[in-house]
Image (spheres, rainbow, N blue to C red):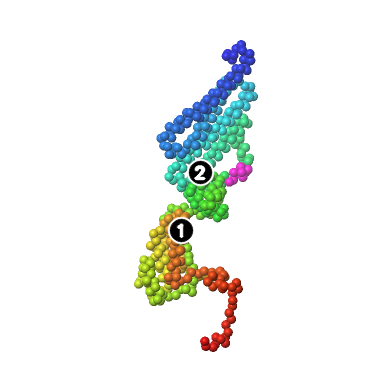
């Protein structure tokens, strides 16, 4: 007021000047802390550990802006009565707005601190085995619930205990609304404690059509990126309430299982005679996998093939021979006798695994005629090109019994 004594509209000019000084002070504090001081501290701290702290840069930037906003709210409330010349009712409204913004900024600051703590935890070695994303979301949810209660109590000018006492009357509604959240929270604790699922696990949940890699473990949902690049969302509590398959054990083991079978035509199974023995003995490749001199007498061509297949798998460079390896016969069926090949590949990657399976089956199918065996294959009902007649309709020749009886 002394600045504008004797000036027309001194009260108005004084009010406008004081308000402008207050607003400019808030902008200066926000820009100084949010754009200069706190980013400078962040830059210095990042140089100490560029990899770890550098990965948290987006979260630290959010924290800087929110902390600067909180300082502005504190400055606004602390200097409101002495700077901003407004009426009594307007002062109450502006104070309520300032207090509300202060509580909101404090809630966001706590949320940022929790996120930064979670980011630091995720950089630890055992973080993938014990994910805490669900717990982080619970802490944030509780924080914002407390902030909401405080804001309502400020607006209604009532004690927070008065607001909390009203929750008892709507407890049933609250449980109904937050049913999935409560179930997800309990499931998150069980998943983290028992290490059921973690980031990067390959899981299969047949009820939801999920078959792929876990990319997110939230409080309410688990996101799975399927192998066709679609994303399936599964309620978190369903991983505990239902059943699912986790391929983590295979990925951490020494190999990936190969379990394929080949159906043999049972009419082609016979004992090995001298002619077949000579043919097999002349095959140089057999000497690398079986020794004909050590075979029992008599031995079937199928038994010889099983010994050959097992020797072939044992000497294959891509098969882990320290794990179970066998070639066995299964129950005979109406479509042949299944011969199962059971072993484990050293390379667990999908493409390499499929190529190895195909390579093994191609080789074993190719050597079947060498053992005078035939694979079982259902007849398609079509003529092959070699037996198809030249004309469009197959000719049927009826034999004359009288001609057959006469000598030619």
Classify mark 1: residues with Cα within 10 Å, few (<14), some (14-19) or many (20+): few
Q: Residue furthest front?
A: 390
Q: Secondary structure at mark 2?
A: helix
User: Compared with residue 22, is residue 323 higher up or lower down, i.e. above or below?
Assistant: below
Tell me where residue 322 appears, x and y as whole percent.
39, 59
Magenta segment, which residues? 172-180
Q: Residue at x 39, y 71 (%)?
A: 280
Indicate the quadrant where residue 392 lies. bottom right
Q: Earlier in the sequence, mark 2 or mark 1?
A: 2
167 left or right of 343 in image: right
User: Compared with residue 23, is residue 348 higher up or lower down, i.e. above or below?
Assistant: below
Question: Magenta stretch: residue 173 in it?
Answer: yes
> Disc 2 designates what residue?
133
In-front residue for pair 243/276: 276
Classify mark 2: residues with Cα within 10 Å, few (<14), some (14-19) or many (20+): some
Tell me where residue 328 appears, x and y as whole percent.
44, 67
Q: Nearer the viewer, mark 2 or mark 1?
A: 1
Q: Secondary structure at mark 1?
A: helix
Q: Residue at x 39, y 65 (%)?
A: 311
Q: Residue at x 55, y 55 (%)?
A: 206
Q: Residue furthest bottom?
A: 406
In-front residue for pair 348/199: 348
Is residue 115 visible in the rendered image? The answer is: yes
Tell me where residue 207 appears, x and y as whole percent.
57, 54
In-front residue for pair 219/67: 67
Quadrant containing the N terminus in the rendered view: top right
Tell me where residue 60 appears, x and y as whole percent.
48, 35
> Disc 1 designates what residue?
355
**Main secondary structure type of the part rendered in magenta:** helix
Q: Residue furthest left?
A: 293
Question: Magenta stretch: residue 236 in it?
Answer: no
């Amino acid at each position: 007021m002394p600045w504008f004594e004797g000036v027309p509209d001194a009260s108005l000019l004084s009010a406008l000047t004081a308000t402008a000084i207050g607003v400019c002070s808030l902008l200066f504090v926000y820009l100084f802390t949010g754009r200069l001081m706190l980013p400078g501290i962040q830059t210095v701290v990042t140089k100490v550990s560029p990899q770890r702290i550098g990965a948290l840069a987006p979260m630290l930037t959010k924290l800087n802006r929110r902390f600067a906003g909180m300082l502005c709210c504190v400055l606004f409330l602390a200097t409101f009565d002495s700077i901003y010349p407004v009426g009594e009712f307007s002062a109450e409204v502006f104070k309520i707005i300032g207090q509300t913004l202060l509580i909101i900024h404090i809630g966001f600051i706590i949320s940022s601190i929790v996120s930064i703590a979670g980011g630091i935890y995720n950089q630890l070695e055992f973080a993938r085995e014990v994910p805490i994303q669900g717990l982080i979301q619970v802490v944030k949810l509780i924080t914002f619930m407390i902030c909401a209660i405080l804001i309502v109590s400020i607006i209604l000018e009532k004690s927070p205990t008065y607001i909390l006492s009203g929750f008892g009357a709507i407890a049933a509604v609250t449980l109904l609304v937050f049913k999935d959240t409560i179930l997800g929270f309990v499931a998150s604790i069980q998943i983290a404690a028992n290490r059921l699922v973690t980031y990067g696990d390959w899981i299969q949940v047949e009820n939801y059509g999920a078959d792929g890699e876990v990319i997110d473990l939230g409080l309410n949902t688990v996101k799975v990126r399927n192998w066709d690049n679609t994303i399936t969302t599964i309620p978190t509590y369903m991983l505990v309430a239902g059943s699912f398959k986790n391929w983590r054990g295979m990925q951490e083991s020494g190999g990936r299982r190969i379990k394929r079978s080949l159906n043999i035509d049972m009419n082609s199974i016979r004992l090995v005679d001298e002619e077949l023995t000579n043919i097999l003995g002349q095959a140089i490749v057999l000497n690398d996998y079986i020794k004909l001199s050590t075979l029992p007498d008599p031995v079937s061509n199928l038994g010889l093939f099983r010994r050959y297949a097992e020797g072939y798998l044992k000497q294959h460079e891509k098969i882990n021979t320290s794990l179970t390896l066998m070639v066995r016969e299964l129950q005979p069926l109406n479509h042949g006798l299944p011969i199962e090949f059971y072993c484990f590949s050293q390379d667990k990657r999908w493409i390499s695994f499929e190529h190895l399976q195909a390579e093994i089956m191609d080789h074993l199918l190719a050597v079947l005629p060498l053992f005078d065996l035939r694979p079982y294959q259902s007849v398609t009902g079509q003529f092959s090109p070699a037996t198809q007649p030249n004309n469009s309709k197959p000719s049927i020749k009826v034999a004359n019994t009288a001609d057959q009886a006469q000598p030619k």
